[in-house]
Image (cartoon, rainbow, N blue to C red):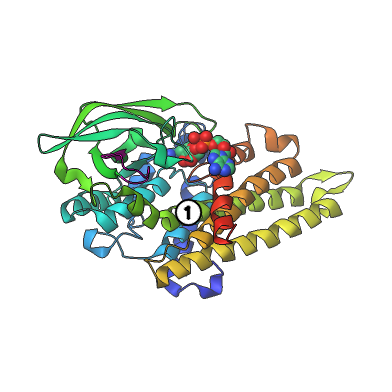
Amino acid sequence: MPIRTLTDEQRAFVEAIRDFARRECGTREQREALTDHGREPHNQGLYERIADLGWLGVAIPEAYGGSGGGAVDMCLLCEEFSRGLIPMGFFPITMMAARPVERFATEELKREILGGITRGHVEAIAMSEPEAGSDVGNLSCRADRADGGYVINGQKTWITGAHAATHILLVCRTNRGADKHQGMSMVSIPAGAEGMEIRPIETMGGREVNDVFFTDCYVPAERLVGREDHAWPQLMAGLNNERLIIAAQAVGMAQRAFDDVLAYVKERKQFGRTIGSFQTLRHRLADLATELEATRLLVYDVAARVDVEPEAMLPREASMAKLKATELAKRMTLEAMQMMGGYGYAVEYDMERQVRVALVTTIYGGTSEIQREIISKTLGL
Ligand SMILES: Cc1cc2nc3c(=O)[nH]c(=O)nc-3n(C[C@H](O)[C@H](O)[C@H](O)COP(=O)(O)OP(=O)(O)OC[C@H]3O[C@@H](n4cnc5c(N)ncnc54)[C@H](O)[C@@H]3O)c2cc1C
């Protein structure tokens, strides 16, 4: 966010997060200890301390224990978590799962789930399946009506933080209509539900995602979120929220990689001078700084528009923000690695991990190709 357009309160919020990051995650040793040497993207102890500071509820309504902020506040938090390398890996997905609950769930579920988030609970959302990735509408995990509730059977895959989550917001099939996007529902499954099995998937990012299997898993009807058979419009209503969260995270990643490489090229000497004095590097850094600034403006402009008109879907703008910010995070970290030479590639330093974390941002939450499809449709193509 251009700093002059932040309120005093938002500026103080950003400063407080930066200060926390410096104190708690400022050294390589602290980061190694908090992430089990990069294997754990999320540290629950630290997360609960951040909950105690009231930050996790920044975009949760006051009625459920949050501070009732909006999209800009949420983006500031996501950006600063990334920039500070604070291992809060499951916060973004928690907020993605929170939005449909806030908009569509019963009061009781809102109190349980949104209230829990403000106290440090992780939440997960399960849409993807082996045969339903970009084509979410092809999902087949089903919930059949039985005994005043639903019996769930099927498989979900790539579910971020499922192993740490208090609930999984499941998107499943309750009907099959002529249009594949009809007949889906959202159901909140509590952790440890009988008939639900969670198995880790190994990735470049450490312990983050899981397969989740459902075998005759029963949940009472009160755990339906929103209207039966209406999950698709409910999902669509939250897409700008999801894309903004990922975009803000990506801006933070890009900023951190930029900060780190800038410091490096000012120190590292070759041929008797700092490598940052070579024009080829200086100009690349000037271009990257310009692109970072432009991307941040785009992301926060979309967030500000959402705050003005929370019901607006903004499909083109939200997709542009997600596409631009994640592609920049990927390019920035790769450029930073290149400019750091062998030291960028060594596991002993942070940059190789920053590259791994940035690479996946153009895949999850709708790939870059899918964002381009959405943008080109809005151009009448
Ligand atoms: C680390 C990680 C975390 C994730 N977390 C979650 C989560 O918490 N919950 C959840 O539900 N899902 C999650 N996902 C799943 C993620 O949303 C999907 O991986 C993503 O939507 C892509 O689906 P896919 O992997 O099946 O790839 P596919 O859909 O098979 O795509 C493969 C390639 O084909 C391209 N492609 C597909 N269709 C088109 C098209 N129409 N036009 C042009 N190109 C196309 C894609 O862009 C991609 O390059 C996560 C994934 C990862 C890797």
Q: Image point 29% across, 50% down: which residue? A: 230
Q: Foreground: 148 or 99?
A: 148
**Residue 334 seen from this side:** yes
Quadrant in the picture for the C terminus: bottom right
Residue 179 belongs to magenta span = yes
Judging by the rendered image, the residue that carries numbered circle 1 is: 243
* Label 1: element kind: helix
Magenta part of the protein: which range? 172-182
Residue 155 belongs to magenta span = no
Q: Foreground: 224 or 71?
A: 224
Q: Residue furthest front?
A: 178
Rendering coords of residue 348 (x, y %): 63, 32
Rendering coords of residue 12 (x, y %): 45, 67
Q: Does residue 206 lie above or below 370 as drawn?
A: above
Quadrant in the picture for the N terminus: bottom right
Distance from mark 1 CB to nearest ligand 1 atom below 8 Å: no
